[in-house]
Image (cartoon, grey):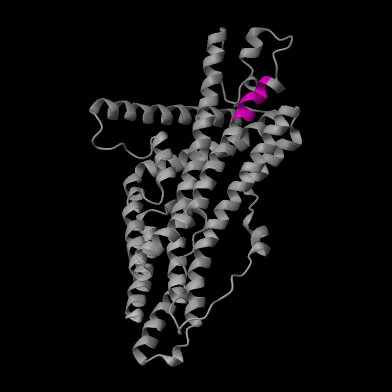
Amino acid sequence: MIFLALPFNLLKCIGIFSLHSESSKWILFVYDLYRGFIFVLTFTVTVLMTVQLCLVTDLTMLARTIDVWTLFMSGIFKWVFMMVFNEEFAKLNSTLTQIHAQGRVAYGEYAADEFEVEFMKPTRKITWWYMFTGLIVTTIICLSPILSYPKGDRSDFEYYNDPKSYPLCCWIPFMLHEKWMFSVIFFSHALAFAFVVFMYLNIDSFFFGAIYAVGGQIELLKLSLDSIENFLTKIENLSCTDQITRYTQKQDVSFALFQLTLSTGVAETFSVLGFIGLSTWHQFLNNFFGEFIIQKQLSVGTALYNVPWWQANKKIRQLLTAMISRTINPTVITGFYLYKLSHESFLKFVKALYTYYMVLRRVNG
């Protein structure tokens, strides 16, 4: 994909998008097995964690389990949703390309391409930092039971069958007697957690990149309007730092704070602090990109209002009115709708931008 190459390729690593049709049958077969392994592993761990939540009576274990359980539920939901509708999400490639083609016509090919390359750089940085922070949090949480709940004077049998000895507090349906059984379950927990964190963060990076790419085309439209000589005046960029406090939601962090108050070890405390930081950063990006596309659409309306329409003829005034009407009710992306940014959602962006660019071409003409 032109705009979403990095998150698109990363999503292939967790089995969301299909491989190229030119791949051999054996490669496709192994890839399908890999997809099935991811689902079976993460789903099984989630079910066992759910059973543990229903049976646990220790508040410390409950606090340690419930925040990670919400992460697993959300990650699996996103993964399954994108797997079911992966063809719709893959259509974002052609959709964004069509939008970009309209921008090149209105703004100029070289200038539009150069602007798009520079504009999309922050999304690549966000994706890499998102993955890096997720790797750090995964490592801390997986090492936490080794540091917080060492074997000590306990017997092997007691240590192997204690849910606190594992990265995730899951119900163990049978008794463990051998070290290799303990190692397999420990590694399975760590692998499942790494998969879910990768799902959770990379899918969001894909959405953020798609929203940001469309926002870039809207910004390009605004620059096109501002560049019409003797018709538009420059507008100042307004600071939005006073809105940052509205971007941070507390729902995903509350469970982690609950665990923090009941943490008994330094390693566990650091793992929870990392989880809180990652959750806060995730909520900020969710709300920022949800608001981002609205602000970009409104900026077009601001630029249009600055057009000296009284100097234009009737036809131009009608065209400007049509463009302004598109900005009165900007597309709002909040809550569950964020996860439905598939072809249907982006059709709204495409239709609006088509109208903008077609009218702009007629104005320039």
Residue 146: % across, % down:
66, 20
Instruction: Decide: is 109 above or below 131.
Output: below
Q: Residue at x 51, y 44 (%)?
A: 127
Residue 319: % across, % down:
36, 83
Q: Residue at x 54, y 30 (%)?
A: 193
Instruction: Decide: is 1 above or below 355.
Output: above
Quadrant occupied by the C terminus? bottom left
Residue 299: % across, % down:
51, 72
Total numbered labels:
0
Please report the bounds of the magenta region as a residue range: 139-146
Q: Is residue 147 magenta?
A: no
Left/right placement of residue 224 relative to residue 290 reads left
Q: Residue at x 53, y 41 (%)?
A: 128
Any part of residue 258 in sight: yes
Instruction: Decide: is 239 above or below 123.
Output: below
Left/right placement of residue 187 relative to residue 310 reads right
Displayed quadrant of residue 115: bottom left
Q: Tell which of 245 and 120 is nearer to you.
A: 120
Outermost residue to the front: 110
Q: Is residue 142 magenta?
A: yes
Q: Tell which of 63 and 256 is nearer to you.
A: 256
Q: Tell which of 338 and 219 is nearer to you.
A: 219
Residue 333: % across, % down:
49, 60
Q: Tell which of 238 and 116 is nearer to you.
A: 116
Main secondary structure along the magenta-highlighted residues: helix
Any part of residue 173 in sight: no
Left/right placement of residue 168 relative to residue 260 reads left
